[in-house]
Structures are given as structure tokens and as C-alpha cells.
Image (cartoon, grey):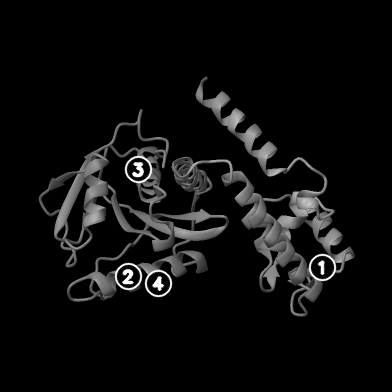
Amino acid sequence: MDDVQQVRSFSRLVTERLGVLMDSYLDRGRPLGASRLLWEVDTAVDVRELRARLSLDSGYLSRLLRTLEGEGLMTVQAEAADRRRRTATLTAAGRAERARLDERSNALARSLLAPLSERQTTQLVDAMATVERLLTAGLVDFSPEDPAGEVAQACLRRYYAEIDERFDAGFDLGTALPFDSGVFVVARLRGEPIGCGALKEADPPQIKRMWVAPEARGLGVGRRLLAELERHAVERGATAIQLETNRVLTEAQQLYRSAGYVETEPFNAEPYAHYWFTKTLNPGTSTKPSRA
């Protein structure tokens, strides 16, 4: 069985075993989509955030919300300051219904594990964790952003705070070499920024401000982000690329070396750098991000 057929077979089995094909998911009188919304709304949630988080069509999401409102489980209200922004909130009945869904979901999970031996249970749970991680990695996307924009600056603030804590003598942005111009890329997971990196205009171009949020590490985001910046460099005609890193960032050093970067002599006066790397770019292999 080839890869595609294995994925399709797995998907069919999961939908069968979890009962997602039924009109009444977990015998609660509504399909899975509506029940999933109840799980997603813990506190008040912006409807646009819900749409991004679940990758739902706006029309379909609106129909699901109306269904839950009609059942008295949720309220959806426009904000007074901006009528285009709507907030979804569970009612008391909605919170009670979500608790019942949790009970039935737990029972369903136990029923899947019950026929298995202890060894088989461990195998299945471990395999599920791996599948979840890899499928989550596939949800990450990358896009160029204005480095002065709100999203980019939020990523940079977290990056600066982390290296200030990790570097031996802290970090002072005014002392570091600047990112003057070039491309700034942000990685997002379900609409939320989880990483960033910059390609600084130089000859050859330089990678700066590489950062992945702690909660997203282990998904291969750093490697894909690196490949995305290399792709932008190739599109600009570069045949080589450079970067530098601090000695305490051992995980970054490992990533760069495994991605084909070779340690070289210092090419700039970055005060926080202890290692400098360069890589020859091959237009035939650097135009697509690496798999996570």
C-alpha cells in the first residue's frame, strides 16, 4: 500500500471508530462540528479566532453557531466598538452540555482501549501521540510580514526576552547588529504566530532573528523556517547564505550543521556571535521548505 492509500485507509478507520459519520455525535443530537465548537469555547472567544483555529468556512461556522444559539447553548454578540467583531460565549446550559460531552468522550476513549492488552494500549497511545505531532506540524504555514508590524514585533519581543535570559551576559538590542532590510517571515499554527526569521540583504544574504516558540518546538518548524528563508534567498539570485549564532544556542548549532551549514571565519562584528556559518545554495533543491 503506497503512502496516499495508507493515509486514506487510516482516515476511514478513524472516522468509523470515532463515530464522526453519525448525525448525532455521541448521541447528543447534533453532528461533530457543533459539538467541537462547544469544546473550543472555554471563555469568550472571537469568532474570527474560532474560524482560524478550526480552518472552517465562514458560512459553515455561522450555521453551526446559529444552531448552538438556537439550542440555548451559546450566545454570539457583536462588540460595541466594532460591529464586525463577534464574540462567542457558552451559556450555563452550554457549559453543562460540554461537561456531558466530556464524559461521553472519555467513555468512548476507554472503549477503544478496553479490548487491547497493556502492551497494545501503550503502542496505540504512543502512535497516536506521534500522529498528532506530525499532523500538527503539517498545519504550520509561513508568510512574509512587515517587520515593524504587530505580529512580527510580538515574535521579536518573545525572542529577545528568551535570549536575554539565556545569553551569559544578557541581550541588548541596541548593541546587536540590526536587521536593516530584507524579508521577515512569520510561522503560524492555527493562525497564531509561533516563530520568525529574517533574511537580511547583504552579499551574500544573512539569516537573522531565527526563533521558534517553546510550545511549538519538536514540530520541525525551525528546519522549515530555515528552508523558507533559503528559498527567498534563491529567488533573489543568491548562491550562498550566511548566519551566526551564540555558543549557548546548541540546538541552533545542531540544526544549522545538519542543514548543510559549514562553520567559517567571522564575516561580521556581531557582538553576541561565537560561531559563523555559510552554506552554498542549490536552486534545484532550495526552492521548497523542508518537511517537518
Labelled disc at residue 157: 4
Quote the CA–CA distance across marks 3 and 2: 24 Å
Kind of residue sitting beneath label 2: Glu
Q: Disc 3 or 4, which lies upstream in sequence?
A: 4
What is the C-alpha distance between the residues marked 1 and 3? 49 Å
Amino acid, disc 1: Leu
Q: Which residue is mark 1?
A: 73
Task: Give residue 291's position: percent from left, percent from top.
Answer: 42, 38
2 or 4: mark nearer the eye: 2
First of labels 1, 2 by sequence position: 1
Question: Mark number for residue 162?
Answer: 2
Q: Position of residue 256 (x, y in %)?
A: 25, 47
The residue under the point 85% across, 54% down is 29
Residue nearest the viewer, comparing 263 with 111: 111
Furthest-left residue in this view: 265
Q: Quadrant of residue 123?
A: top left
Asked whether residue 175 appears in the rendered view, the answer is yes
Disc 1 from disc 4: Cα separation: 39 Å
What SS does tag 2 mark?
helix
Name the quadrant containing residue 14. top right
What is the C-alpha distance between the residues marked 1 and 2?
A: 41 Å
Residue for badge 3:
230
